[in-house]
Amino acid sequence: MVNLVERFSNRYDFFIVAHDHDGKTDRKPYTSVRSGAWNTTGTAQVYYSSRKKFTVKLTSKLVTDIAPDLILLNSIFSKPSILFMTALRRKLVRGVPVLIFTCGELSKPSLSVRKTKKMLFLAVAKRFGSYRRVFWKASFDDERRDIEDVFGQGLDIKLAPDLLPKEILPTFSMDAKPVKSPGSIKLVFVSRIDPKKNLNFLLEVLTLIDTGDIKLEIIGPHEDPHYWNECKELIKKLPNNISTNIVGSVPNTEVLDRMKNSNFFVLPTLSENFGYVFIEAMAAGCPLLISERTVWNDVEEKQVGWELPLGSKETWLQKLRYCINMDQDEYFKMSQNARNYALDWLNNPEQESATAKVLEHAIENGSK
């Protein structure tokens, strides 16, 4: 959303409605903004609401007051999205075109997490026809198929890759990267700690590597306490040659600095519709070790990393050992390739023009 506002605030006025806290695992209200009021944040107006006061009534009032040309929902399952769609179904808001970014939520691996609750919600939504007249944005063809698998054919779906910032680490220098000595490695895992991101798989593979000096940094919020407890038990079983640094949630600028100080980015995700963090990692000079369940199927061809099958721990084991034993010359080439790959994406004008077309299509056709 930050990137959307940054790139399009010269064309549109943005009004964003959000919770006044980070999420389920951190409900402490922000102290730098006014809750229950509009705040000027950059070039956007942002209304922060407490969980208790975030209701259908408030949602419909805010939409009525703003009278927008387009409603953009950045999720299907989030509370703000559900509240708005409920207001729409009850006809508390009228005549507003709706554009939904599903952000990979409808992929089969994503739906398999908390499956019963999600499938019940989708069944009710389809029964009431809640999503019959909305517009959809998919990042890639795979996501388009996921949307059609759930809601059927004949939908108005347009493709546009997720928006990136105009720059990531603009002053980056390869001199900032740690030296890669054979027999040692610095790995960084950056993501929410939940079953979909599959940290336990990585930890299970690492328990099989008892040689080399391995440092693993784990960055991200612990959104599923039960799952995190499982991961902590696996961390206790890691061999003595592996050290872990559990960072938790940190600001994005710190995430980038930590990736800059790492050798490889690793994420054995069960599913990823785009993988914004992959571009961030490569911009920080980190080649990728990721699962084959992403859209980044050219990383090995471009010599910026590997897509590895989750069905073979042996393949992950072999590749990790290969990376551990890699020398500085080979690593430097991969790291430079990763940085250049990210810069090519950031400088590609197609990503912005594709999103522009999606927004224009929804506004023009939604008013008919």
Image: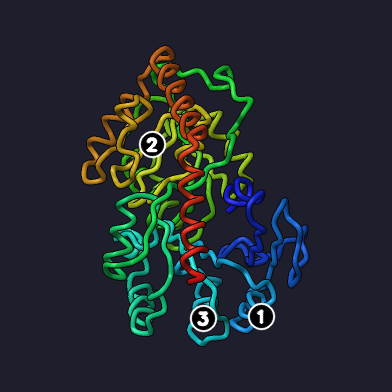
Q: Residue flagged by tag 3: what amino acid is it?
A: Leu
Upstream in sequence: badge 2 or badge 1: 1
Q: Which residue is mark 3?
A: 88
User: Is residue 243 visible from the viewing direction of this image?
Assistant: no
Q: Residue at x 47, y 31 (%)?
A: 342
The picture places residue 131, in percent across and down from the top left corner, at 40, 74
Q: Determine which of the numbered discs, if any, sits on residue 239 in the image.
A: 2
- Few, some or many C-alpha atoms within 10 Å of disc 1 (few <14, some 14-19, many ≥20)? some
At numbered mark 1, what does the secondary structure look like: helix, strand or loop?
helix
Q: Which residue is mark 1?
A: 61
Separation (CA) of disc 1 from disc 3 = 12 Å
Where 311 sits versus 259, above or below? Answer: below
Nearer the observer: mark 2 or 1; the answer is: 1
Image-based side of 161 in relation to 167, left or right? left
The picture places residue 143, in percent across and down from the top left corner, at 34, 55
Q: Residue at x 51, y 61 (%)?
A: 74
At numbered mark 2, what does the secondary structure look like: helix, strand or loop?
loop
Where the N terminus falls, by quadrant? bottom right
Upstream in sequence: badge 2 or badge 3: 3
Farthest residue, direction bottom: 90
Farthest residue, direction top: 329
Q: Residue flagged by tag 2: what amino acid is it?
A: Pro
Upstream in sequence: badge 1 or badge 3: 1
Q: Nearer the viewer, residue 148 or 342?
A: 148
User: Is residue 312 visible from the viewing direction of this image?
Assistant: yes
The picture places residue 35, in percent across and down from the top left corner, at 74, 69
Residue 240: image quadrant is top left
Q: Residue flagged by tag 1: what amino acid is it?
A: Lys
